[in-house]
Amino acid sequence: SLEEGRLNVKKPFPRQKTEEELIDILSKITVPTLLLGGMRDPISLPANLLRSCGAVKNSKLILYEDAGHGLDTVHTDEIVTDIVEFCRARHLL
């Protein structure tokens, strides 16, 4: 059903019961990964993003100081610039 397929933002990896299991899953990601977040985000907490970035190989985390969860509506130009720079640095563009 649609409800079963809906993402629970508080637990986006529901099959992983422990922190160790989550880190194990994240450590299997091998593609260049850019994580973007806001320091004032009550949903994707900066500490969780930092943990995820540490687990994902070839990843980078950018936190926007005055942003919440909708950071793309406030920092649009900065985000585009950061994504382009990330991709260029990895020869993806």
Image: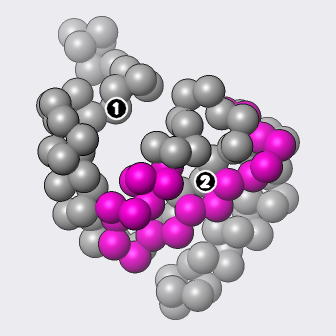
27 w.r.t. 9: above or below: below
75 w.r.t. 27: above or below: above
At a point 55% along the width and 37% down the height, the residue shown is 45
- Give the residue type at disc 1: Pro
First to last magenta residue range: 49-69
Q: Are marks 2 and 1 in contact (CB under 8 Å)?
A: no
In magenta segment, residue 57: yes
In magenta segment, residue 65: yes
Q: For label 1, count other residues whose C-alpha is less than 10 Å away and answer few (under 14), some (14-19) or many (20+).
A: few
Q: Earlier in the sequence, mark 2 or mark 1?
A: 1
Percent from the top left, x then y, of residue 24? Answer: 17, 55
Q: Nearer the viewer, residue 63 or 34?
A: 63
Res. 68 image quadrant: top right
Percent from the top left, x then y, of residue 47? Answer: 52, 45
- Give the residue type at disc 2: Leu
Query: How many dots with numbers?
Result: 2
User: Along the horizontal axis of the image, is 83 left or right of 48?
Assistant: right
How far, Cα to Cα, is label 2 from label 1?
16 Å
At a point 34% along the width and 26% down the height, the residue shown is 11
At a point 64% along the width and 68% down the height, the residue shown is 83
Q: For label 2, count other residues whose C-alpha is less than 10 Å away and answer few (under 14), some (14-19) or many (20+).
A: some
62 w.r.t. 91: above or below: above
In the image, which disc is placed on residue 29? none
SS for dot 1? loop
Residue holding disc 1: 12
Quarter of the picture containing the C terminus is: bottom right
Res. 21 image quadrant: top left
Residue holding disc 2: 36
